[in-house]
Image (spheres, helix red, strand yellow):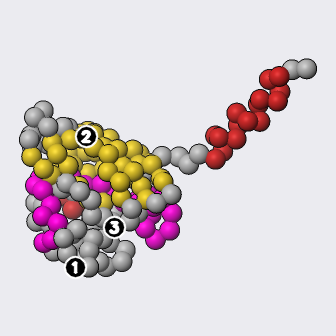
Amino acid sequence: MNRHLFALPFLLIPSFAAAEDLRASFVDAEGNEAGEATLTSTQNGVLISVEVAGLPPEQWVAFHIHETGHCDSDTQHESAGGHFNPTDAEHGFLTETGPHAGDMPNLWVDASGTARAQVFNPFVSFEGENAVQGRALMIHEGPDDYQTQPTGDAGGRLACAEIE
């Protein structure tokens, strides 16, 4: 009896059950490649692994999901629209009726100008009205204060990634 015939169906099952990760490639304000993100769906949200270079060293920078997945450096990434906010909640973790789906914690940039992090966002998903595909990840020039409306006083847009 050939044991390999019995093992074959078990090898195929995981490939059909596993969800595909989403990917996003960051471009800076001049349109140059700046980094990548991988988004992984979980039962209770989305895990975002990010690595972006060319940022202001040794400081915190804001990290958000924006509503439109279009990163045009000619417009300083204004093409990505505002924060993704399907429930019209206030911006910020420190507000009474916030946060909204696009709010995420600030990222620390190391001495070389690179931010590396894994951020879990429980307010978004891969499906439904809170779906992230077709939206953009955005890194701003300063930290989010988690309360100023509508952007957290985070400053200009330094790097943008279209979520595919």
Number of marks present in the image shown: 3
Amino acid found under the numbered disc labelled 1: Glu
Q: Which residue is mark 3?
A: 101
Q: Which residue is mark 2?
A: 116
Q: Position of residue 90 (x, y in %)?
A: 24, 77
Q: Position of residue 159 (x, y in %)?
A: 21, 49
Which residue is found at the position 30% from the left and 71% from the top? 100
Report the disc number at residue 96: 1
Is the magenta region chiefly helix, strand or loop? loop
| Viewer can see residue 131 | yes
**Foreground pick, 92 / 136:** 92
Location of residue 66 by image quarter? bottom left
Query: Which SS class for mark 3?
Result: loop
Q: Position of residue 43 (x, y in %)?
A: 50, 57
Query: Which SS class for mark 2?
Result: strand
| Viewer can see residue 156 | no
Q: Which residues are magenta?
A: 125-148
Q: Position of residue 42 (x, y in %)?
A: 48, 54
